[in-house]
Structure formats: C-alpha cells, structure tokens
Amino acid sequence: MQFEETKEFEGDAAEVWKRASAVTDIPKYWHGTRTLEVTGESRGAVHVKIRFAFGGSGEADISTDEAKRVLTIDYTSGPFTGKQTVEVADRKVVAVWDVKFRGAFRLMSRWNENHFKSGTAHALERLTDSGNWAS
C-alpha cells in the first residue's frame, strides 16, 4: 500500500514539528497506535514496541531529521512492514505510507488502505489543530 496525504495549516510550523516529532506522543495524534513503548536506541533511531488499535502488535525504528523536519517510522514486524514518513513544511504537513500487509491483514488490504487513509487525514488534523496546543 502506497499513498500520500497532505494537510495545509495556518499555524506555526515549528509547533507542528514539535508535536509530530515527539515519539512518545504518537498515540495522541495517530489513534491507530494504541500504545508505544521505547525499548532502546541505535544509530540515531529509537526502537519501539507498538500495540495497534485495530489489533496486533509490532516493532519499529523511529528517526527524526531535525533539519528537514522529517519523522521516519520503519515498521520492522507486525501486521505490516515498511515505512511511513511525516514531513512538516512551512504551511503543510505530508504523510507518506509505503507498507505491505502481512498474514490475515492481506485479506482485507482494500479496507485497510481506506482505513489508513482516513486515519492519516484525522491524525494530520490533530497535529495541525492550533486550538488544542498546550502553552
């Protein structure tokens, strides 16, 4: 499954990046991630265990590029594997997914893709909603 979702915003790009790059806050904005536990660090990335809201669990390596404002999640095990990136520019945030479903999740790949697209759109709304930013 490959797709890209973009959300334009009026708020402060630095604040959106601060929210997008806060690894332990991912479940606040990405509701498909029920829990996320940092288990270690290696080569500039944090290793995490993830429990998904739709069932299943997996592991991933998450890295951030502060200069480019890009968060990369490399899903290494679980119901899907592959990469997701979130990039924050001056007035837009872009999420790109390139993952492959595994096991029983392959049987529902069309439904999963629509669900991921909808969830991504909602996550980008939450990330860019300046009305909910803490001071």
Image (tube, rainbow, N blue to C red):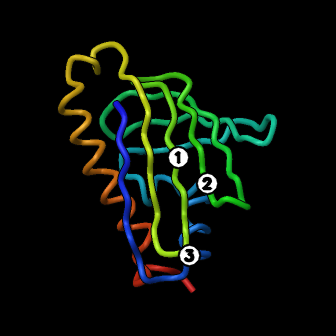
* Left or right of 22 in this view: 116: left
Quote the CA–CA distance across marks 2 and 3: 12 Å
- Which residue in the protein does label 3 denote? 13
Report if the CB atoms under discs 2 and 1 are less than 8 Å apart. yes
Q: Which mark is residue 70?
A: 2
Q: Amino acid at mark 1?
A: Thr
Q: Dot 3 surroundings within 10 Å: few (below 14), some, or many (20 or more)?
A: some
Tell which of 27 and 94 is nearer to you.
94
Instruction: Identify the mark nearer the N-term, 3 or 1.
Output: 3
Q: Amino acid at mark 2?
A: Val
Establish if 132 lies above or below 24.
below
Work out whether mark 2 precedes mark 3 in sequence or the reverse, and give the earlier one.
3
How far apart are the alpha carbons under marks 2 and 1? 7 Å
For the point 24% across and 42% down, which residue is it?
A: 115
Residue 121 at what x, y percent from top left? 31, 57
In which quarter of the view is residue 19 placed?
Answer: bottom right
Picture coordinates of residue 7, whole percent (x, y): 37, 65
Q: Position of residue 128 (x, y in %)?
A: 43, 72
Q: Quarter-wise, where is residue 80 in the image?
A: top left
Q: Which label's residue is closer to the chain start, 2 or 1?
A: 2
Q: Which mark is residue 85?
A: 1
Q: Residue at x 38, y 59 (%)?
A: 6
**Kind of element beneath mark 3:** helix
Give the residue displayed 48% in from the left and 75% down from the top: 91
Q: Give yes or no for contact between labels 2 and 3 (Cβ–Cβ under 8 Å).
A: no
Q: Amino acid at mark 3?
A: Ala
